[in-house]
Image: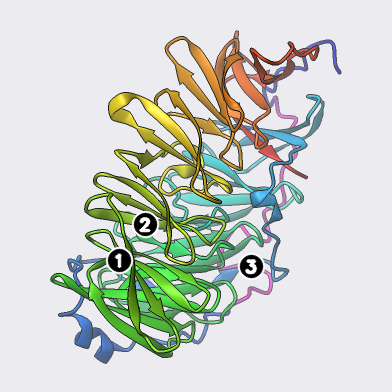
Amino acid sequence: MPDSRPPIFDDGGELPEVDRSRRRDRHAIDEPIDRYGDLRHPNYLIRRAVVVGVAVAAIAGGAVAVGTFLGDDDGGSGDAFTSSDWNTIASVDDITGSIVLADDTGEERERFRLGVQPLEESQLLGTTVVARTDTQLAFVSLKDTDTVTEVDVAAAGDLVMPSGSAQTVIARTADGGRAVLLNAASNEVIDTSTLDEIIGARYDVELARSDPSGRHVLVTDSGNFQSVLFSFDRDTPSFFPGLALAVDDTLVVTAQNVGTDATVSIFDHEGEPGVSARTQSVRAGMIVPGGVVLVTVDGGVVMLALEDGSTREAGQLTVGTVLEGHVAVRGDRLIVVGEAGTAVIDEQGETLVDLPDARPTTAGIDRRAPRRNDCLIVAREAVGEIAVVDLADGAIVAEALANPDVLAGTDGCRVLVPTTSGYLLVTRDGVLRATVTGDVVAFSPDGRHVVVDRENRLELHTVVTEDNVASEDEPIDIGRSGRSVLFADL
């Protein structure tokens, strides 16, 4: 372990320039993969037929075209997105766009410039750093730092992950008329601006749904009363009547709500219709073996059979009026949020837990949807309490008096929470007081280490609790403060 601090990463002109000649301009890419070149247009007769049946306000959108792929064809593994292992610390300077990689002892491995600056946002998906400026989206694999891909897009607001996955991000323009999707497992891009225009399109990407791999993303186009499937495994997008409800690697589910009733329809990815059913208005859905779990606006749980479209009542939630539902990234749990609480439903439509007055926390990667592998973190803000729920069986494994601004490991079962008197570590083994000196700015994927900002330096510490003998390891200095800190397994 080094016994002296490493030099300040001031960038001093020593960072290598990355090779961006191959992907600087999306119109000047060597041998681009143009899988959406023969775009299949939406069926306007179907659109007109379903206008009356869709409860979405028509919002005027800008002109848009749907889709092209830019990127590698080698697919990609999702292991890096579910593993808690790490061996590399990446510190990102949002002002200069520089990235410094160090190992778990603090020894520097590499430094390079991203090539765009200043960064409005930077995050790590697996081993890919994704960053956004006012005018560009840029990403680079930490396994191939010589090549940075840039897409010219004036993204409005934060990058969005579709509900159901932690492997894909979406940038969208202010009018919703253009979206750029990046699957970080394969570093493939779908850009809706490069092909034929779809008049009046408005992509509600905040409501997008995905399978766990992030390769199949279903987006509601509220400007045209339809849903659009963007798939990294298919040559063209597909179009469906109704609101985006659920998607997996073979099926799409949409809903057309009319008053207090809904028509739920099943399609394959090509757009061929399967069964459909009438229910009360639907707010959430999950595709399961042989059927679809549906949750109505009043909390009714309904099972729809794929074989014949029949339905049966499976239960009744007590979460009040249902606001939204999200499939967990593990793919087999439906997390339903209502005005009066949160519930978790399994593949059989059974309610594993019904949590009154609780809402999923929205810190970090869980900003818009729960994305931890094994545990769900909920908060009861009225009483200043959080709870950790095991997604396997719905058991509450730990509770603590704390606010919802939490830091959590990949599995969601080890949670660091700030309190007025310091930090607590909430685990399956109980609630422990953590000894932390400085402001915590990052939490490792395994929940065993923290990065603190202390005296204008960033330091890596092993988490020490009251039942744990103080670690003999000295803090590891990883550079000056003012940088974002990310963890990767390279």
Sequence-first tag of 2 and 1:
1
Sequence-first tag of 1 and 3:
3
Q: Which residue is mark 2?
A: 325
* Figure quadrant of residue 386: top left
Main secondary structure of the magenta stretch: loop
132 sits left or right of 78 in the view: left
Q: Residue at x 29, y 38 (%)?
A: 357
Sequence-first tag of 2 and 3:
3
What is the magenta range?
12-33
Q: Are marks 1 and 3 in contact (CB under 8 Å)?
A: no
Mark 1–mark 3 distance (CA, rounded to whole Å): 28 Å
Q: Which residue is mark 3?
A: 29
Q: Which residue is mark 1?
A: 202
Q: Nearer the viewer, residue 472 or 74?
A: 472
**Residue 51, image x and y in percent?**
19, 80
Q: Amino acid at mark 3?
A: Ile
Q: Nearer the viewer, residue 345 or 408?
A: 345
Q: Amino acid at mark 1?
A: Arg
